[in-house]
Amino acid sequence: MKKVKGTKKVYNTSVLIDDQGEIQAVYRKMHLFDAIVDGKILKESRFFIAGKTPTLTRIDGFKVGLSVCYDLRFPELYRRYAQKKAIFLCVPASFTKNNR
């Protein structure tokens, strides 16, 4: 995680590592999850700062669009990737576990 200068917040980040073990692309989550789930307040923006830039890269000649979890609810990001001819979308996710 990269700390944001002038704040204690960091970016929620997805890193694409190539087959040589090198960082090929970095995407900073653009849409933060602030919600109330089963009466519990979840405020990702309390600890994270939103990224501003979509990330499109290539793997073996195929265009790949990067995103993270909650970004999935915002179709304009994926529409942009589709317009730029992305073939694959990477969407690592972790959902809130209900401990009842």
Image (tube, rainbow, N blue to C red):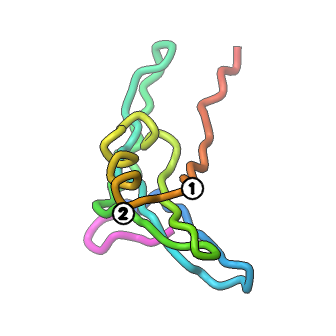
Mark 1 Cα within 10 Å, few/some/many (few <14, many 20+)? some
Position of 64 with respect to 82 (left or right) is right
Res. 48 in view: no
- Which amino acid, mark 2? Lys
Q: Nearer the viewer, residue 91 or 83?
A: 83
Single out the mark in the foreground, 2 or 1: 1
Q: Earlier in the sequence, mark 2 or mark 1?
A: 2
* Occupied quadrant, residue 29: bottom left
For disc 1, the marked residue is: 88
Residue 43, position as x, y percentages in the image? 39, 36
Real-space CA distance between mark 2 and mark 1, rounded to the nearest whole angstrom? 33 Å
Mark 2 Cα within 10 Å, few/some/many (few <14, many 20+)? few
Res. 87 in view: yes
Say what secondary structure mark 2 lies in: loop
Seen at 60% across and 34% down, the residue is 95
Instruction: Give the magenta range.
Output: 1-7
Label 2–label 1 contact, CB within 8 A = no
Seen at 35% across and 46% down, the residue is 79
Seen at 51% across and 68% down, the residue is 1
For disc 2, the marked residue is: 8
Seen at 42% across and 25% down, the residue is 41
Say what secondary structure mark 1 lies in: strand
Measured along the vertical axis of the image, is residue 10 above or below residue 72?
A: below
- Which amino acid, mark 1? Phe
